[in-house]
Image (cartoon, helix red, strand yellow):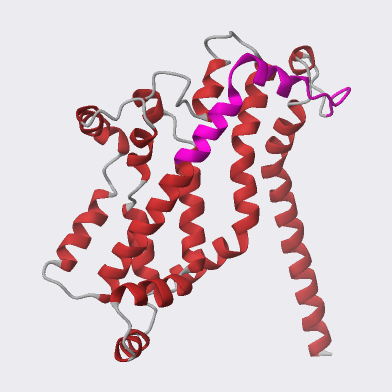
């Protein structure tokens, strides 16, 4: 009877937890679903009171008007180029630096690492002026490189990689060295395959940061050839007036790639965050 009573209590408890989680999920997803459905509404429908949850008729007119109004396709390509390059470089530099801090002993290692971690407390706007001066001095204004350079290195990524790589046994690396593996082969054949989960987690963080960047591209880009999606959304707030139906459609198009990336890598993302938190 006691075992049966315990099973009943467990069932009630888990049912209650699932109900609470479902309610929270609906609360958090509702604004996103409303935004997506609003992209199919006309300006008059969006401004109507009381508001309608579902559009009267599903139409792609808003999407067509966006591409006819501004070169949104070009903005998308620019964002993909900048984000892909920035994320690749961030993963490369963070994993290599994390490997060095986790598995090599050199003079001043702890001091350098503590200095880097303390630099995480410095907000990005404080570094904008010196960073812009450097980019301007190098003649990189109005180029892809100007937008990539600000996201190719991540102190948080280095910290995350170090914590994860510290959990890889040193005996595994020593065995590889005895077998004749060089340091580069150890990095590519042992370290990288074992840190795929945390690479996915950092990749999502880096993608979100680079894709959603607004202030820095606004400063270093002056023409449509290199504008990103976030700058494209701004067009419908200033240059073309208060076009609510186009603003919300452009915003939805800017968010969708992040959702897709997360859905593809969510398993690795959750695993990476969980396993990284277990490292000493």
Q: Quadrant of the C terminus?
A: bottom left
Q: Main secondary structure of the magenta part?
A: helix
Apparent side of residue 154 relative to residue 201 in the rendered image (left or right) = left
Quarter of the N terminus within the rendering: bottom right
Q: Position of residue 181 (x, y in %)?
A: 33, 83
Residue 244 image offset from top left, x and y in percent: 66, 16
User: With 89 as the anchor, is 51 left or right in this view?
Assistant: right
Q: Is residue 248 above or below residue 109?
A: above
Would residue 276 be seen by someone viewing this image from the given angle?
yes
Query: Front-most of 31 and 175?
Result: 175
Please report the residue visible at 15 percent of the width from the left and 63 percent of the height from the top.
111
Q: Is residue 124 above or below residue 204?
A: above
| Left or right, 251 with reference to 56 | left
Name the residue: 21% across, 60% down: 114
What residue range appears in magenta? Answer: 54-82
Q: How many marks?
A: 0
Q: Is residue 63 magenta?
A: yes
Above or below 164: residue 56: above
Q: Identify the residue at image location x=61%, y=37%.
A: 255
């Amino acid at each position: 009877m006691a075992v049966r009573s315990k099973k009943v209590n467990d069932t009630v408890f888990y049912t209650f937890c699932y109900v609470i989680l479902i309610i929270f999920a609906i609360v958090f997803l509702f604004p996103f679903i409303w935004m997506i459905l609003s992209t199919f509404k006309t300006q008059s429908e969006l401004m109507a009171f009381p508001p309608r949850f579902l559009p009267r008729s599903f139409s792609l007119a808003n999407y067509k008007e966006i591409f006819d109004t501004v070169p949104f396709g070009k903005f998308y390509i620019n964002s993909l180029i900048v984000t892909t390059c920035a994320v690749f470089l961030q993963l490369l530099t963070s994993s290599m630096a994390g490997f060095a801090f986790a598995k090599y002993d050199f003079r001043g290692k702890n001091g350098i690492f503590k200095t880097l971690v303390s630099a995480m407390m410095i907000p990005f706007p404080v570094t904008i002026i010196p960073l812009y001066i450097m980019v301007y001095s190098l003649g990189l204004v109005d180029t892809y490189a100007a937008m990539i350079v600000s996201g190719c290195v991540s102190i948080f990524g280095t910290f995350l990689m170090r914590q994860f790589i510290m959990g890889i046994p040193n005996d595994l690396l020593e065995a590889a060295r005895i077998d004749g593996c060089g340091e580069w082969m150890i990095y590519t054949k042992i370290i990288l395959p074992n840190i795929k989960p945390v690479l996915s987690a950092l990749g999502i963080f880096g993608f979100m940061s680079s894709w959603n960047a607004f202030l820095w591209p606004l400063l270093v880009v002056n023409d449509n050839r290199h504008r990103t999606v976030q700058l494209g959304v701004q067009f419908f707030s200033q240059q073309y007036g208060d076009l609510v139906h186009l603003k919300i459609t452009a915003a939805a198009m800017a968010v969708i790639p992040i959702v897709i990336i997360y859905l593809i890598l969510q398993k690795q993302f959750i695993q990476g965050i969980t396993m990284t938190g277990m490292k000493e």
